[in-house]
Image: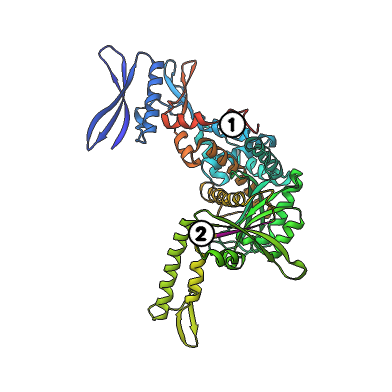
Amino acid sequence: MSGFIRKVKTASGATAVQIVEKRSGVRRIVEHVGSAHDDLELAVLVQVARERLFAGQQVLDLGLDLPRAGDVPAGTDRSGQAVVTATASQVLWQVLTEAYARLGFEALGDDAFAAMVLARCVEPASKLATIEILNDLGVRAPHRNTLSASLKRATARDYRDTLAKAARAYSLASAGTSALILYDVTTLHFENGEEDDLRRVGMSKEHRVDPQIQVGLLVDPGGFPLEMHVFEGNKAETTTLIPVLSAFSERHDVSDLVVVADAGMLSAGNLNAIEDAGFGFIVGSRITKAPYDLAEHFARHGNYFTDGQVLESTRQMGTGTAARSRRVVYQWKFKREQHDNRAINAMVTKAENVADGSRPMRRDRFVKITDATKGVDWALVERARQLAGLKGYVTNLPTTTMDGAAVIAAYHDLWKVEQSFRMTKSDLRARPVFHHQRDAIEAHLTVVFAALAVARHLQDATDTTIKKLVRTLRPLRTVTIAIGPHTLTAEPQINPEARKILDRLPPINGPGH
């Protein structure tokens, strides 16, 4: 089925504008848009029809549309003729530029950088393709050399510092004062790249063997990005946290930071270093220590817990002079116990299959080897079932600062960092990275960070993913029509889905601006 616009002369001499579909060779009028009595009315009606076709995802038969300026031969008398001189996704572009301004990023004073950031929100691409994207949006695109010069300025003038300060100011204005920040690390790989001092083969979360870099991301409790840092690909995750926190503290002149990080950051030495630097922390705890931490509970109640029950204990972490007493918070949940027991049952089945020879020996849990005999380690299974449903958290915050329930709630916000990383990798396509020089890599990630902030802000404000927002607003084209010496601007018809998005956006002088 294809849809197109048809113009038909009526008995009264007017021109009827219709949307027609062709299905199996049969034409059917879908909608009568209206009747025009002059070229100006006709231009408007055809534009309305175009917008309705576009919104309906049908195929536009351009042969029946208004002519465009480039289609009119030189020397042709155009007086009285309606000609489309320009079209633009003005609604989408205005939403993006206002978001960029609302975040305070205009402080950079670099239009080319802003164009790269906002084009990446629409469709991530190379510099050359970015120009094509901007042209398609109806935005005057900078020259490729201008974009390259902007990327060099991004590093030379430390745009990331300006962006980080603006992001922090926006976060404080919109979410209120908070010393709590969330941190996680991911990897970005390079295609067919050679190793150097930055791009190194290291521990990959995706089990790749390409050169990679480590990217550390700080976000506020709502998931809004605050800072992005780049490290060597073979650098251990645990060693990235102190430099990131120290840079954040110095940049924003704050000292009462509390960082939330996953269990990968949990080592006695690392926690001591965080504490010695003056920072608070909440990190995941390895559950294998639970029987010792909760010995009194198990002695009195066995493995009986109430759903959502919170328990606390202390644990000595580290050895010798590095040993320190740490507060440990545990929570038991019924749903988590069900999930854990299903996982245990699956692992027991694998161990039994190894024992009877129907499954080859791998790194299977619960397999016990005695001399040449393979069997199931039922003592280990029983211990695992005892711990099912429990999750632990380690913190250096006193109970007067944050009780157990608040510690758990803060840790559970870590998924928001993962969500931002997913947006970075998928919607904004920060990977794979095709740059080779360190400055170029840093500049690329500065653009990605700014685009992530814009996308995250719009997503939170409209409760719509950036991908859906672009898909909804991009087809709304503003058309400029020339009729003789006169110019007419035809605004797009705002459909209900687009209106819902636009009505949720805050004013340009809202929080953070």
On the question of residue 476 being in view, the answer is no
Quarter the N terminus occupies:
top left
393 is within the stretch colored magenta: yes
Height in image: 203 above or below 403?
Answer: below
The residue that disc 2 covers is 305
| Point 56% across, 34% down: residue | 96
Q: Which amino acid does label 1 sit on?
A: Glu
The residue that disc 1 covers is 98
Q: Distance between the residues labelled 2 and 1?
A: 51 Å
In the foreground, 202 or 419 = 419
- List x then y, in percent, for residue 60: 36, 33
Q: In this view, does 149 lie to the left or right of 419?
A: right
- List x then y, in percent, for residue 310: 57, 55
On the question of residue 434 being in view, the answer is yes
Quarter the C terminus occupies:
top right
Q: In this view, does 157 lie to the left or right of 139?
A: right
Q: Which amino acid does label 2 sit on?
A: Phe
In the foreground, 413 or 441 = 413
Start and end of the magenta stretch? 391-395
From this viewpoint, which residue is outermost toward the bottom?
A: 371
Q: Earlier in the sequence, mark 2 or mark 1?
A: 1
In the foreground, 398 or 268 = 398
Q: Within 10 angstroms of label 2, few (less than 14), some, or many (20 or more) residues?
A: some
Height in image: 114 above or below 395?
Answer: above
